[in-house]
Image: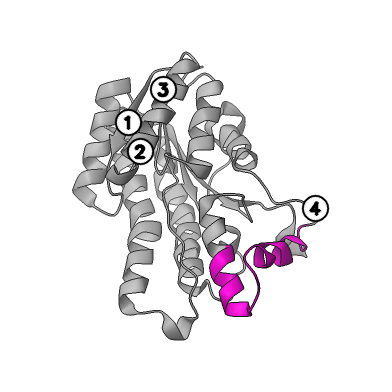
Amino acid sequence: MSKNVLVTGAARGIGKAIALRLAADGHDVAVNDIAAQETELETVVKEIRGLGRRSAAVTADVSDPAAVTAMVAETVTALGALDVMVANAGIAQVLPLLEVTPEDWDRMLAINARGIFLCYQAAAKQMIAQGGGGKIIGAASIVAHRPFALLGHYSASKWAVRGLTQAAAMEWAEHGITVNAYCPGIVGTAMWDLIDEKLAESEGLRKGQAIEKYSNLIHLGRVSVPEDVASYVSYLASPDSDYMTGQSVMIDGGIQFA
């Protein structure tokens, strides 16, 4: 059955892969990112339409409450009732905790935790207004289960997502809304290119060596690709996951067990 979906942070990387996978699954997909990514976002819209599905680009800063409310309203205007929210947008920064400034902390939490909260809340309000039912899916991380050194404030923001996901699942179950999160490991994206570069600098390694070092801990023997995560989100958006809520599942090739 076709659903109407909104995916944030969808101009590239995991968000783009999720949007395209859900379109391939037969859903209509609105895609969001910040205004600076509008050109890339329009390319994603064209790819979705090329799959025979409806799509719309909705630019917004997910840390801005008014912008998130407007984003959901624009999605409903373009596609109809909102069935699935994928709150994917996020940022990363590699810094020792002794060097993290209050401004660094506030920016990280504003996008990765406050942004997820605002998207969850706006989606739930819309779904309840529609009569209830729906799926809310958020981006956590393997560091929501076990933090990495030099990713302290990033880890904290993802632990917040994990806790929020559980609380939202409890509160909104009576409305027929499920809330789950996905926890990617090391993924071949621009975000992990940045993490690799900064980790390499801090550990006296060449660019590429840090990600290689941590990749050696992956039991399945390879760095994941965005499509690995998108496959799991496809399940969360489908009826197969109707009896699953409050979960934050790792898609990491086994690195957290290494």
Q: Quick one: label 1 or label 4, which is nearer the N terminus?
A: 1
| Count of marks overlaid on the render | 4
In the rendered image of this protein, does residue 234 appear above or below residue 222? above
Q: What stretch is highlighted in magenta?
A: 196-218
Q: What crowding class fits label 1: few (fewer than 14 Cα within 10 Å), some (14-19), or many (20 or more)?
A: many
The residue at the far left in this view is: 66
Q: Name the residue under label 4.
A: 221
For the point 44% across and 65% down, the residue is: 157
Q: Mark 1 points at which residue?
A: 57
Q: Position of residue 205 (x, y in %)?
A: 65, 74
Q: Nearer the viewer, mark 2 or mark 3?
A: 3
Alpha carbon of mark 2 to alpha carbon of mark 1: how far? 6 Å
Alpha carbon of mark 3 to alpha carbon of mark 1: how far? 10 Å
The reply to whether callout 2 and callout 3 are in contact (CB within 8 Å) is no
Question: Please, what is the dominant secondary structure of the magenta stretch?
Answer: helix
For the point 35% across and 58% down, the residue is: 111
Alpha carbon of mark 1 to alpha carbon of mark 4: how far? 36 Å
